Image (cartoon, rainbow, N blue to C red):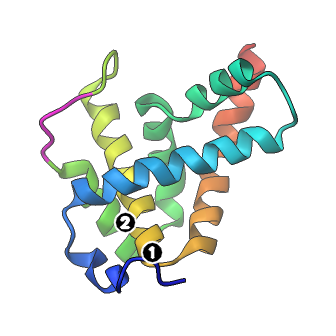
Amino acid sequence: MELFNNISAEADRLSPLVLAFIGDTVYDLLTRGYVIAQGNAPVNKMHSKAKHIVNATAQSQTYSIIEPFLTEEENAVMKRGRNAKSNTSAKNQSIVDYRRATGVEALFGWLYLKGKYDRIGELYKIGTEDIYEKGQQKK
């Protein structure tokens, strides 16, 4: 599906922060779908479940979980995102977690712009299920 006038060809040249910009939305949308798939519930409970997955700490954990499953190219994109210098930081999160989360978001943004939707699904599933299950046990 070509929505953005051949942006796929440009994805490799985009700033890692631009990749993270779109990747943040991709990751959030996947998480909302994942939470809905767990069953119908009041929206405030769904939002609470989603917040457990979409935050710098959880995404930093995702970084560690998916890293062994990445290709060299994917790993390079994720590291570019992690090492990008940002003028902002997450509230109540460590800088290490924030940077690793940016790496995950950059990877998901790059995969999205490249049209690698199946790969996004694979990595999301690998990186999220363990985190979600741990969050369920705490409640």
Residue 101: image x %, image y %?
38, 42
Q: Position of residue 113 (x, y in %)?
A: 41, 72
Q: Is residue 2 above or below residue 71?
A: below
Give the residue pinned by disc 2: 75
Q: Amino acid at mark 1?
A: Thr
- Return the residue nearer the eye: 118 or 44: 44
Residue 53 in percent (x, y) is at: 58, 34
What stretch of residues is rendered in magenta? 85-89
Residue visible at 81% across and 45% down in the picture: 37
**Secondary element at image label 2:** helix
| 61 displayed left or right of 96 | right
- Which one is nearer the viewer's eye here, 116 or 40? 40
Name the residue: 31% across, 86% down.
9
Q: Give the prevailing secondary structure in the magenta stretch.
A: loop
- Residue highlighted by disc 1: 71
Q: Quadrant of the N terminus?
A: bottom right
